[in-house]
C-alpha cells in the first residue's frame, strides 16, 4: 500500500473501510461548500467513490494518488488528499485537492499533508510543476497552498460566475521557496 508519513499523519491509499468516514466528510455542507466536486449525499455514493478511487489508485502506470489523511496517534480518518494529472496543463503538470473534517481544522494538518504530497510529487514523481486552486472566499485553502510552498498565480472567473484563485510552482520555484 502506498503511504506517506509526516510527524503527525499517515497519508495512505484508500481502503473499503474508509467509506464511512469519507461519507461523513463528503456529506458535510461545511466541507463541500468550497469543493462541491467531492459532495456525495448517501453512504452508497461515498462507498462507490471509494471503490472507483481504489481502481484508479491501483492502475499501472499510476496517474493519481487519492489518499486518506489518518492521525498516527489514534488512527482517525480525518480527511482526503489527492493529486493527479492537471485539468489545465498550462498552469501545472499535476493538480491536487483536499478536505478535512471540521473537528480537525486550524491545527496545521492540511499544510502538513500537502507539504508531504508536494515533496513526493516534485522529488519522486519528478513533476515539473504543480498547481492548485480555491474559491476566492476560501482564504484558509489559499493560505495552506502558500504555506506549503506554492505562489499565487492569478484570479480567474469560472463558468458558473464565481471566481477562483490559482496557485502553482515549478519544481525549482518550490525548492527555493522551501529552502528560503
Ligand atoms: C481548507 C482546509 C483544508 C484547511 O485545513 P486546515 O487543516 O485547517 O489548514 P491549516 O491548519 O494547515 O492552515 C489553515 C491556515 O488558514 C488560515 N485561515 C483559516 N481561516 C482563515 C480565514 N478565514 N482567512 C484567512 N486565513 C484563514 C489559518 O490561520 C491557517 O494559517 P496560519 O497557520 O498562517 O495561521 C479546511 O478548512 C477544509 O477542509 N475546508 C473544506 C474543504 C475545502 O475547502 N477544501 C479545499 C477546496 S479548494
Image (cartoon, rainbow, N blue to C red):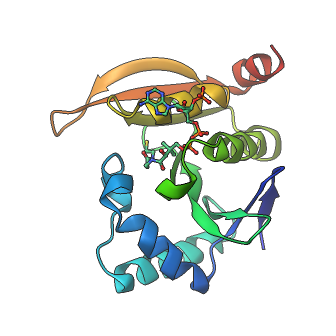
- Name the image quarter holding the N terminus: bottom right
Whole-percent x and y of residue 101?
A: 50, 59
Residue at point 65%, 39% (across, down): 111
Residue at point 79%, 65% (across, down): 73
Quarter of image, res 179 = top right
Residue at point 63%, 43% (across, down): 107
Q: Is residue 135 above or below residue 51?
A: above
Q: Is residue 25 above or below residue 98?
A: below
Whole-percent x and y of residue 32?
A: 34, 55
Q: Residue furthest front?
A: 103
Q: Is residue 49 above or below residue 148?
A: below
36 to the left or right of 84: left
Residue at point 52%, 57% (across, down): 103
In front here: 144 or 128? 144
48 to the left or right of 118: left
In front here: 120 or 60? 120
Quarter of image, res 94 = top right
- Name the image quarter holding the C terminus: top right
Q: Is residue 29 visible?
A: yes
Mark count: 0
123 to the left or right of 131: right
Amino acid at each position: 500500500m502506498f503511504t506517506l508519513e509526516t510527524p503527525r499523519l499517515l497519508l495512505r491509499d484508500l481502503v473499503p473501510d474508509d467509506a464511512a468516514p469519507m461519507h461523513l466528510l463528503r456529506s458535510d455542507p461545511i466541507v463541500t461548500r468550497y469543493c462541491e466536486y467531492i459532495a456525495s449525499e448517501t453512504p452508497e455514493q461515498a462507498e462507490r467513490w471509494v471503490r472507483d478511487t481504489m481502481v484508479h489508485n491501483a492502475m499501472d502506470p499510476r496517474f493519481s494518488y487519492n489518499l486518506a489523511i489518518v492521525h498516527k496517534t489514534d488512527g482517525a480518518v480525518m480527511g482526503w488528499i489527492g493529486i493527479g494529472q492537471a485539468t489545465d496543463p498550462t498552469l501545472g503538470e499535476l493538480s491536487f485537492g483536499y478536505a478535512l473534517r471540521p473537528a480537525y481544522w486550524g491545527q496545521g494538518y492540511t499544510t502538513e499533508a500537502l507539504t508531504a504530497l508536494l515533496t513526493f510529487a516534485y522529488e519522486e514523481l519528478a513533476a515539473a510543476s504543480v498547481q492548485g486552486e480555491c474559491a476566492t472566499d476560501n482564504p484558509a485553502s489559499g493560505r495552506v497552498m502558500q504555506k506549503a510552498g506554492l505562489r499565487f498565480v492569478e484570479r480567474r472567473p469560472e463558468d458558473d460566475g464565481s471566481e477562483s484563485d490559482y496557485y502553482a510552482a515549478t519544481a525549482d520555484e518550490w525548492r527555493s521557496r522551501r529552502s528560503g
